[in-house]
Image (tube, helix red, strand yellow):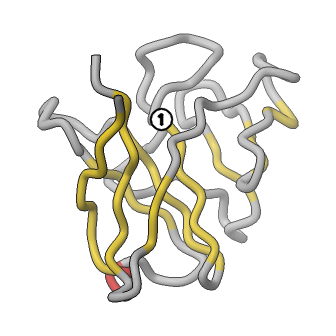
Amino acid sequence: MSRGVFLCRLDELPDGQSRGFDPLGAGRDTLLVVRQGRDLHAWRDDCPHQPGTAMAWRKDAYLNRDGSRIVCHAHGARFDIATGLCTLGPCLGQALTHVPLQLDSADHVYAILEEE
């Protein structure tokens, strides 16, 4: 069973930027979203090289300087934004865990989370 958890409005995610969220109230960001136009890509904020390691070096700072890759601050691993695949670093060939999103007609962004 899955449920949608409201994250934000689309206009609260700057185009070409990333943002972290805590949809389950864990006390830290556990999900990261990257916006590219109207395309949104969401991943668990958890490096596959060392599970449990948060990826941002500061709040919402998940991307490299030119915004073309997601970067793990702890290991320097780089990930493709659209696929989550590690393209450089210690977890080469591994991937981030995808989190499905839903964008409704009012431009509200929801994370679709599996209930345990």
What quarter of the picture does the N terminus occupy? top left
Number of residue marks? 1
Q: Circle 1 is placed at which residue position?
A: 44
Q: Position of residue 9 (x, y in %)?
A: 30, 79
The residue that appears at 30% across and 51% down in the rendered structure is: 4
Task: Determine the image quadrant of residue 11.
Answer: bottom left
Q: In which quarter of the image is the C terminus?
A: top left
| In the image: residue 23, left or right of residue 33 | left
Amino acid type indicated by mark 1:
Arg
Task: Give the image location of residue 101, x and y in percent.
Answer: 48, 56
The quadrant where residue 12 appears: bottom left
**Residue 33 left/right relative to 47:** left
Disc 1 residue crowd, few under 14, some 14–19, many 20+, Cα 10 Å: many
Which residue is farthest top?
A: 50
Q: In this view, does 22 lie to the left or right of 110?
A: left
Determine whether the residue tagged by mark 1 lies in a helix, strand or loop: strand
Which residue sits at x=66%, y=57%?
64
Locate residue 69 relative to residue 55 in the image: left or right: right
Q: Where is residue 57 in the image (x, y as percent from the top left)?
A: 43, 44
